[in-house]
Amino acid sequence: MMIYQNFCREEFDDAGRLTGIQFHYPDNFNFGYDVVDVLAARTPEARAMVWCSSEGEARVFTFAEVSRRSNQAANVLRRAGIRRGDHVMVALKRHYVYWFLAVALHKLGAVLVPVTHMLTVSDLVYRMGCVPVKGIVCTPQNNVPRKIREAAAQKAPDCRLWTVEEDVEGFENLTRAMETAPVDLPRQETAVHDPMLLYFTSGTTGYPKGVIHDFAYPLAHAVTARYWQQAEEGGLHFTVAETGWAKASWGKLYGQWLVGSAVMIFDFDNFDPKQLTTIINRFGVTSFCAPPTVYRYLIRKGIPDMPTLRHAATAGEHLNQEVSRRFTQRTGLPLAEGYGQTETTLLLANFRGDDPVVGSLGTPSPLYRIELRNADGSRTAPGEIGEIVLLPPAQGKQLGLFTAYLNNDALYEAAWAGGVYHTGDAAWQDETGRFWFHGRFDDLIKTGGFRVGPYEVENVLMEHPAVLECAVMGVQDPLRGQAIKAVVVPAPGYAPTKELEKELREFSNARMAEYKWIRYLEFTAEIPKTISGKICKAALRQ
């Protein structure tokens, strides 16, 4: 029996499709103790992680090793004063210590705050200003320690700083400290509805917002892993994601271990489709999940035989039907599309037992009550475009849904206006009950698998004296899905030249993480606005 089945009761139809799932768990459920440590006791030599780097290094870690090393990491943190409810920021890229550390923080009842290593100093300053960070653990690579030091000096001067593997001035070496730390850890007191995880996710009208999940959150990903990604007990699942993003929680940790699958971790900086498929074949990956951008590159470069791969899934942005058709034609594997948000777990998908339909988001997860609604709150008719909304559960607490926005009760209440959770995403439903994505109701940009709020880019661009006014939007791009485009009204005294276009792009891109870079810039004499004075981006796109 898979360990997630200790915490739920499942219902199936005559064809074997999951139709219902009800979870039950103790008030002190903790993924570290009740999943990782139990797996370590039950199957100590079973693979938990297979890690390799682009430099050719490779390591395999068992559940017993993850349990032991997470205890050592937890003891290092305890000795430094990290306790239940404390926030610890982690920027470790895809280094294997992330997995030990995440479990360690869960065991302590501390709040894990993952961030991407691509953040700039100003990005880090903003995040540290939002949440009282008591510790930071970062990679020694990519100039991250310098950026962390600068940001912490401004906003968190008393927090403890750690890095891994290498000695870096101003940082303690967590890896070395773990080596001599005790391997035993008494169970710490935690509660299932305590905050466990905090992700920053982009919004359209302001800086990124903090999304908080509790200790029950991992259980909901059993559906993600088993019924969408089709990770298997004893198998090896590979999700392409960096640990700073919620996709890592979806595909590199919780659900996979709950179903007894190992996770494949490929530590790289520069994406190379050929290298990716080499990893799949070298280590025998059985299930794979990546954003559509990855599949577009794979198609472009040519897909080799991948004999061990039994299932492929995708999410994060719109999937081009031609890409899906060509992938299936080459591999024999249909691409199972899925949909969800940082605030949720998997909401819609082409589930196990379905015949995936190209371009469709699939059907609702049995965990959620999902409808399409018009602006007035009424339900849409089949074929009619509406907003994807979540209704509260018929009884009990909703598993897998965020519990709050950091320091912003008003935003949380607005997300639940009218008694339903508003995703902001538009879709339509066909006569068979399948959902089809239509777009965003707001202006959030999804580029290369990343979510970017236009405000973040506009705010940087406005710092240049040549910019009187600007608007940023996503435009169609054959590789990224969407690329970021800026429309600029030049300030008096500046002419709209090619030289100025290049200067503005270089000015902005040098101040932003790479995933936010402006790819196109256009000048205009006037930006269209609504009657209330807001920029009308729909008119700009036209």
Image: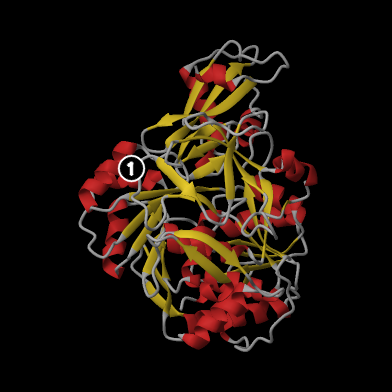
- Few, some or many residues within 10 Å of mark 1 (<14, 14–19, 20+): many
Q: Is residue 542 left or right of residue 208?
A: left
Residue ID for mark 1:
296
Disc 1 element: helix
Q: Is residue 165 left or right of residue 464?
A: left
Q: Is residue 378 left or right of residue 276?
A: right
Residue 76, image x, y percentages? 66, 79
**Residue 164 in sight:** no
Q: Looking at the image, which residue is at 64% across and 57% down?
A: 148
Give the camera-side residue of 179 and 282.
282
Residue 230, image x, y percentages? 39, 62
Residue 119, image x, y percentages? 58, 49
Q: How is the image coloured?
A: secondary structure
Give the camera-side residue of 278 and 22.
22
Q: Is residue 179 above or below residue 445?
A: below
Give the camera-side residue of 235 and 366.
366
Q: Looking at the image, which residue is at 30% across and 62% down?
A: 280
Q: Looking at the image, which residue is at 51% across and 84% down?
A: 40
**Residue 255 in sight:** yes
Residue 379, image x, y percentages? 60, 34
